[in-house]
Image (cartoon, rainbow, N blue to C red):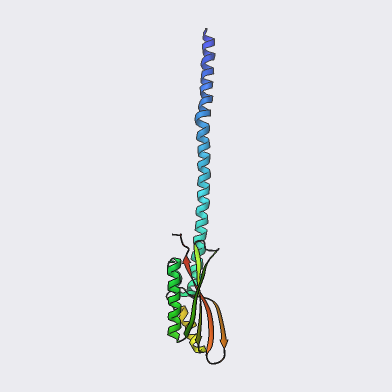
Amino acid sequence: MNQRDRRAIRLGAIALASIAGVWLLILPWWSHWGDQRDRIEHSRQRLEDVQQQTQRLAALDRQLEPILGSAIKKPLVGMEAARTQLIKDVMDLNNRSGSQIRSVQPEGPRPLSELPGVVRVTVQVQSMCQPMQLVQLLSSARSNPNLLLLDRLETTGGQGQMTVTMVWSTLARAEGKP
């Protein structure tokens, strides 16, 4: 083998080693960094979504606080605790206003599509009261320390004693959600 053949073999070996290096080292490294860039972009998108949802909820808090009072700032409790507190609050409201409760019927929770992980806990109350007692009951509901939402109000009767059916609700954390 002469000098020229050795040089050709060395040059071929260097070219083969370069191709193997690119194939085995550079291309996998390049692919890995491409995947990492995609993951970073996906994480940034998720972060932006969470930030937008947080801003939307903060704006909703600011809008609802004048209407619902300071109860909107309280953290959500579980469904059973919320149902128990809702029934207690509604019974206290009726007792303070002097209305007589005839029946209390809890209803099933309803998930809120606009707030994932949150359900609306509802109770229907039927009572007897005077018109002024109803006004007193409704005005004291806003000052309640817990969130009380009046979904429906139906009255039957005349100037004296009225039969009132009210559907009250509150918000709770869905079972199984932190």
Q: Residue at x 51, y 52 (%)?
A: 46
Quarter where residue 76 is shown:
bottom left
Q: Residue at x 53, y 32 (%)?
A: 27
The residue closer to the viewer here, 170 or 9, is: 170
Q: How many marks?
A: 0
Residue 151 position, x and y percent, is 54, 75
Residue 70 in sight: no
Q: Looking at the image, which residue sits at the far bottom?
A: 160
Residue 54 position, x and y percent, is 49, 61
Q: Residue at x 48, y 87 (%)?
A: 133
The residue closer to the viewer here, 19 or 109, is: 109
Residue 148 position, x and y percent, is 48, 75
Is 44 rendered above or below residue 68? Answer: above
Residue 102 position, x and y percent, is 49, 83
Q: Residue at x 51, y 11 (%)?
A: 6
The residue closer to the viewer here, 22 or 82, is: 82
